[in-house]
Image: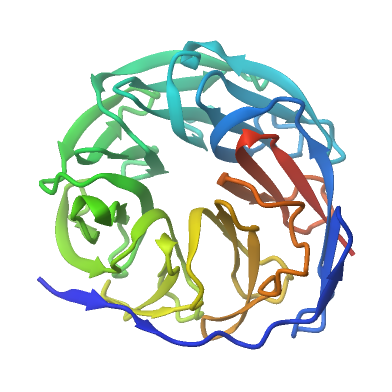
């Protein structure tokens, strides 16, 4: 079984920018100015760990769900990128939610929700009533602390299944097509897993996954390959030496296979895929940080995938892809006020919230307000 050790490289030069308290305006090397402004701040000061965005009521705009320590909250888009607090998922009031994921679980074209809970609470499935309200459907019978979750069709039967990252490894659940889930298997490695990323890493047309683990419990990050039926085998380990809280799979170098972005309490790392699921790593920054969340998307619409870091005790940052998976940190200079303040951002999502074709940002903060940043141009 192959182990990979990351090699540290320097980042590209800092992009020049200027900002006010509520906006930032860096100049990208692509020639496109980037500017965001805060347009929504929740009146709730929650202990938030997760956010998922999507069009819950099929009215053509994106809403979002916040996962909290306490009641999880649903915010509906008013159509212009402003939001109204629409619903609390009261069934979770005594639970500690670390992950929320959205997807159509029963093939009725509406987005449903799965809530992953810690503190030995049940994970919960909510189905959409067709009007954007999430209704409790079932609590999964297995009690396990689950800091992470990811949805995807694991057995190629046309419906969405789920993998939970737990304190005892990764748990694979298959969907019966109606939103009911049965536990298929647990990984043999009993890791504390805070990040799960799904993608076809070897081009065989099924979804594999990578588990981002807590290194201070003795676990490396692990790559698992799918046999096509939802059964997974450990393929290799990726040694980072850091505590991993967030991971994403995306094609950063445009070679038609997904690469790996790892957010650590330490140095964040990008690993390039050789096309067969082997990953070679290099660090995109030399500064140490506490990254708890990541979001990936084409922020400046140049055809390359960029990403946002959600950090603890340091400001959140945006990295622009300069091609071939090299990135520019447009907030390296601490005098640039990219986001409003130092936060504990455990949840991030990118979505177009006002229908202008640009990706906007929603951040879920621990002991703070949820904030939405709209792209300006």
Say which quadrant the C terminus sits in: bottom right
Tell me how the rendering is colored: rainbow
Q: Nearer the viewer, residue 203 or 95?
A: 95
The residue at the point 25 percent across, 44 percent down is 192
Q: Position of residue 222 (x, y in %)?
A: 23, 60
Q: Position of residue 357 (x, y in %)?
A: 79, 57
Q: Is residue 366 above or below residue 268?
A: above
Image quarter for residue 18? bottom right
Say which quadrant the N terminus sits in: bottom left
Q: Total label count?
A: 0
Q: Is residue 18 above or below residue 30?
A: above
Q: Nearer the viewer, residue 108 or 360?
A: 360
Q: Position of residue 26 (x, y in %)?
A: 80, 73
Q: Position of residue 94 (x, y in %)?
A: 45, 14
The residue at the point 48 percent across, 78 percent down is 286
Task: Note whether residue 129 is visible.
Answer: no
Q: In the shown orientation, is residue 377 left or right of residue 13?
A: right
Q: Is residue 201 above or below residue 177?
A: below
Q: In the shown orientation, is residue 213 left or right of residue 54?
A: left
Task: Note whether residue 336 is visible.
Answer: yes
Q: In the shown orientation, is residue 306 left or right of residue 86?
A: left
The residue at the point 18 percent across, 34 percent down is 184
Q: In the shown orientation, is residue 93 left or right of residue 187?
A: right
Q: Is residue 167 above or below residue 207?
A: above
């Amino acid at each position: 079984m192959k182990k990979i050790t990351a090699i540290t490289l320097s980042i590209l030069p800092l992009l020049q920018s200027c900002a006010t308290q509520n906006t930032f305006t860096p100049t990208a090397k692509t020639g496109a100015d980037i500017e965001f402004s805060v347009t929504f701040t929740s009146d709730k000061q929650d202990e938030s760990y997760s956010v998922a965005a999507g069009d819950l009521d099929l009215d053509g705009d994106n809403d979002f769900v916040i996962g909290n320590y306490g009641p999880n909250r649903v915010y509906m888009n008013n159509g212009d990128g402003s939001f109204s607090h629409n619903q609390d998922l009261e069934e979770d009031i005594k639970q500690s939610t670390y992950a929320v994921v959205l997807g159509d679980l029963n093939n009725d074209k509406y987005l449903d929700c799965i809530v992953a809970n810690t503190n030995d609470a049940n994970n919960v499935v909510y189905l959409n009533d067709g009007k954007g309200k999430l209704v409790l459907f079932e609590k999964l019978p297995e009690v396990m602390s689950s800091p992470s979750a990811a949805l995807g069709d694991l057995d190629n039967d046309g419906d969405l299944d789920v993998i939970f990252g737990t304190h005892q490894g990764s748990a694979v659940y298959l969907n019966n097509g109606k939103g009911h889930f049965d536990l298929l298997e647990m990984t043999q490695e009993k890791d504390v897993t805070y990040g799960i990323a799904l993608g076809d890493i070897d081009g065989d047309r099924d979804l594999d996954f990578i588990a981002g683990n807590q290194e201070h419990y003795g676990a490396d990050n692990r790559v698992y390959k799918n046999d096509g039926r939802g059964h997974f085998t450990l393929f290799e380990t990726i040694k980072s030496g850091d505590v991993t809280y967030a991971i994403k799979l995306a094609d950063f170098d445009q070679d038609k296979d997904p690469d790996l972005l790892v957010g650590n309490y330490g140095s964040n790392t990008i690993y390039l895929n050789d096309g067969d699921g082997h990953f070679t790593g290099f660090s995109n920054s030399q500064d140490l940080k506490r990254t708890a969340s990541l979001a990936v998307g084409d922020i400046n619409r140049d055809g390359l995938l960029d990403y946002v870091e959600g950090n603890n005790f340091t400001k959140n940052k945006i990295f622009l892809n300069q091609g071939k998976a090299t990135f520019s940190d447009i907030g390296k200079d601490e005098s640039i006020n990219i986001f409003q303040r130092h936060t504990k951002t455990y949840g991030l999502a990118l979505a177009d919230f006002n229908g202008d074709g640009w990706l906007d940002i929603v951040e879920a903060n621990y002991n703070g307000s949820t904030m939405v940043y709209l792209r300006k141009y």
